[in-house]
Image (cartoon, rainbow, N blue to C red):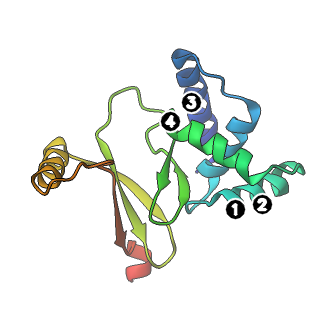
Amino acid sequence: MKQTQVNQVMQRASERCSENGVRFTEKRQSILRLLLKSPAPLSAYEIVDLYREETGETIQGMSVYRMVDFLVENALAHKLVSANKFVACSHIACHHEHETPQFLICEGCGAVKEIAVKGEVVKTLRKGAADAGWQLLSPALELPCLCDRCAA
């Protein structure tokens, strides 16, 4: 993502946090900025290393987990459960409601593309789980794929 785009997204993220009455601290901003700049999802410990490289400061892994939890809770980032990694939300700068995210994860290069799942699909997933006597905890899907570049 280009620096001008990162700046626009960061501005919108700051506005969202203000609207929600939560503090968007400098460290939280730094973590989101790292996620926005990364071409692939990052683990908490990859974030620790990148943070140290970028700022010259050390940050503890547990602190990073708390900060990414904040970002996830405030719809600024997503956790990819299958990889235990984090990615910035693709829709931070948008001003409208979004559908359930679906993540296409390239098995070749590790890149992630966030797309939306239609409401009918989520209803079908919930119903299927309920019919089996289960409760769906998250309708977000993580699908192993190949991006066009890796598939070529």
Which of disc 4 and disc 2 is earlier in sequence? 2
SS of the residue under disc 1: helix
SS of the residue under disc 2: helix
For the residue pair 53 and 46, the one nearer the viewer reads as 46
C-alpha span from label 4 to label 3: 13 Å
The answer to the question of whether label 1 and label 2 lie on touching residues, with beta carbons closer than 8 A, is: yes
Identified by mark 3, the residue type is Ala
Task: From the image, state whether disc 4 or disc 3 is nearer to you.
Answer: 4
- The crowd level at tag 4 (other Cα within 10 Å; few <14, some 14-19, many 20+) is few
C-alpha span from label 1 to label 2: 5 Å
The picture places residue 93, in percent across and down from the top left corner, at: 48, 33
Residue 56 vertical placement versus 27 (above, below): below
Which of disc 3 and disc 2 is earlier in sequence? 3
C-alpha span from label 4 to label 1: 20 Å
Task: From the image, state whether disc 3 or disc 1 is nearer to you.
Answer: 1
- Name the residue furthest front: 133
Identified by mark 2, the residue type is Asp
Residue drawn at (67%, 50%) of the image? 34
Identified by mark 1, the residue type is Glu
Which of disc 3 and disc 4 is earlier in sequence? 3
C-alpha span from label 2 to label 3: 23 Å
Residue drawn at (86%, 51%) of the image? 58
Task: From the image, state whether disc 4 or disc 1 is nearer to you.
Answer: 4
Which of disc 1 and disc 3 is earlier in sequence? 3
- Residue 13 disc label: 3
The picture places residue 90, in percent across and down from the top left corner, at: 45, 45
Q: Disc 4 designates what residue?
A: 73
SS of the residue under disc 3: helix
Q: Disc 2 designates what residue?
A: 49
Q: Look at the image and tell me in which quarter the C terminus lies.
A: bottom left
